[in-house]
Image: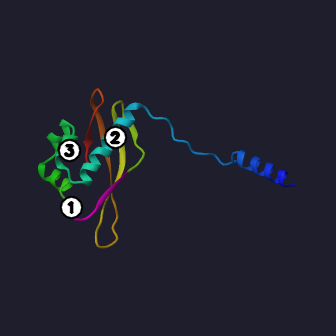
Amino acid sequence: MQTLVASLLVVIFAVPSSGKSKTMPPVDPDYVYALATANHFLHAWQTQDQETAILLLSDRLKQRTSESLLDALLSSNVSKPQSFEIGRGKKLAPGRYQFPIALFQAKTKWTHPQTAALVVVKNGNNDWAIDRLP
């Protein structure tokens, strides 16, 4: 009897469920580079590393963005923790990806994250840059 029960349990757990499993679609190598750049930029924002963050901006974005806007984004109250989430990105065009993001800053009361999108572009051979800020 124990052998029968054990055999039934093996069969039950070995048979896949009838529900559809969601698998992530494959990504190309450019997606990985773009995602790494988005992560690197947001880590620089999180740690208030202005130099690294600015180095990760595209030339086009640097020319079109005022210093005061960059200061507002990259200079916050360092004594309060801040963090981020990056969602699944999508390819906008060859060498151009958009990632939904949420920025979190600890405050004294409940707060909503700032949601936005980062656009990452390919500048050269595996050289990537942020082309749109949150």
Mark 3 or mark 2, earlier in chain: 2
The x, y position of residue 46, in whole percent, is: 26, 54
Q: Which residues are magenta?
A: 77-85
* Residue at (28, 49) in percent of width and height: 43
- Distance from Cα at disc 1 to Cα at disc 2: 24 Å
Question: In the rendered view, would you say 105 is above or below 11?
Answer: below
Amino acid under label 3?
Answer: Thr
- Distance from Cα at disc 3 to Cα at disc 1: 16 Å
The x, y position of residue 124, in whole percent, is: 26, 27
* Residue at (51, 41) in percent of width and height: 24
Question: In the rendered view, would you say 16 is above or below 84?
Answer: above
The x, y position of residue 25, in whole percent, is: 51, 38
Mark 3 or mark 1, earlier in chain: 3
- Give left or right: position of 79 versus 32: left
Q: Residues within 10 Å of mark 3 (few under 14, many from 20)?
A: some
Which residue bears the numbered disc 1? Answer: 78
Q: Quadrant of the N terminus?
A: bottom right
- Give left or right: position of 49 versus 29: left
* Residue at (30, 39) in percent of width and height: 120
Which residue bears the numbered disc 2? Answer: 36
Q: Are marks 3 and 2 in contact (CB under 8 Å)?
A: no
Q: Which colour scheme appears in the figure?
A: rainbow
Quarter of the view holding residue 129: top left
Q: Which mark is residue 52?
A: 3
Amino acid under label 1?
Answer: Val
